[in-house]
């Protein structure tokens, strides 16, 4: 398997976070300018997007960004998709919980991002979950 390039991984993350960010901004503090049904619809769209992303991680080892960039997450030991525990619980939710810890979470997040520059291109969240990101075939 060919490891995904750092650029592809970054662009996939930008796509994933960009779509969530746009919806979150629309339902954020300035949403009182929108009619109530529009805010409810945007909140439902945000929830639906989050659920789709988690489902894709579980079933395919991909997010929308990873699908667009032609990469996927696999287990290092088997090169097979990781499933729910590996991709959703360990790689995504646990990582987000750690990042949310004041001060230590920031330092972890910085180290996590910098790990991409190692030869194996595995971030800390990849190490925790036993995964790597490869070109989808």
Image (cartoon, rainbow, N blue to C red):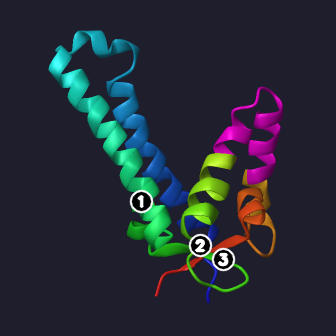
Q: Quadrant of residue 24?
A: top left
- CA gap, disc 3 to disc 1? 17 Å
Q: Residue at x 41, y 46 (%)?
A: 50
Quarter placement of the N terminus: bottom right
Q: According to the image, label 2 marks what residue? A: 82
Is 126 drawn above or below residue 48 in the view shown? below
Element marked by disc 1: helix
Q: Quadrant of residue 114?
A: bottom right
Q: Residue at x 65, y 57 (%)?
A: 91
Residue farthest to the front, as pictured: 85
Q: According to the image, label 3 marks what residue? A: 75
Magenta span includes 68: no
Is 44 drawn above or below residue 56 in the view shown? above
Q: Which residues are magenta?
A: 95-112
Q: Position of residue 54 (x, y in %)?
A: 46, 55
Q: Residue at x 43, y 44 (%)?
A: 18
Asked whether, in this view, residue 71 is left or right of residue 43, the answer is right
Q: Are marks 2 and 3 in contact (CB under 8 Å)?
A: yes
Choose between 91 and 69: the one closer to the eye: 91
Is 130 drawn above or below residue 52 in the view shown? below
Q: According to the image, label 1 marks what residue? A: 55
Q: Position of residue 13 (x, y in %)?
A: 52, 54
Q: Position of residue 89 (x, y in %)?
A: 62, 54
**Other residues around mark 3 within 10 Å, as few (<14) / some (14–19) / many (≥20):** some
Magenta span includes 105: yes
Q: What is the count of numbered marks?
A: 3
């Amino acid at each position: 398997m060919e490891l995904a390039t750092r650029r592809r991984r970054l662009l996939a993350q930008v796509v994933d976070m960009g779509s969530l960010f746009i919806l979150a901004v629309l339902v954020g503090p300035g949403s009182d300018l929108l009619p109530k049904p529009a805010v409810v619809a945007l909140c439902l769209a945000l929830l639906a997007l989050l659920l789709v992303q988690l489902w894709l991680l579980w079933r395919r080892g991909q997010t929308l960004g990873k699908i667009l960039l032609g990469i996927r997450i696999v287990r290092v030991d088997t090169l097979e998709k990781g499933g729910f525990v590996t991709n959703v619980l360990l790689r995504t939710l646990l990582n987000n919980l750690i990042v949310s810890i004041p001060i230590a979470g920031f330092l972890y997040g910085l180290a996590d991002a910098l790990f991409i520059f190692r030869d194996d291109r595995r971030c800390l969240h990849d190490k925790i979950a036993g995964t790597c990101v490869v070109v989808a075939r």
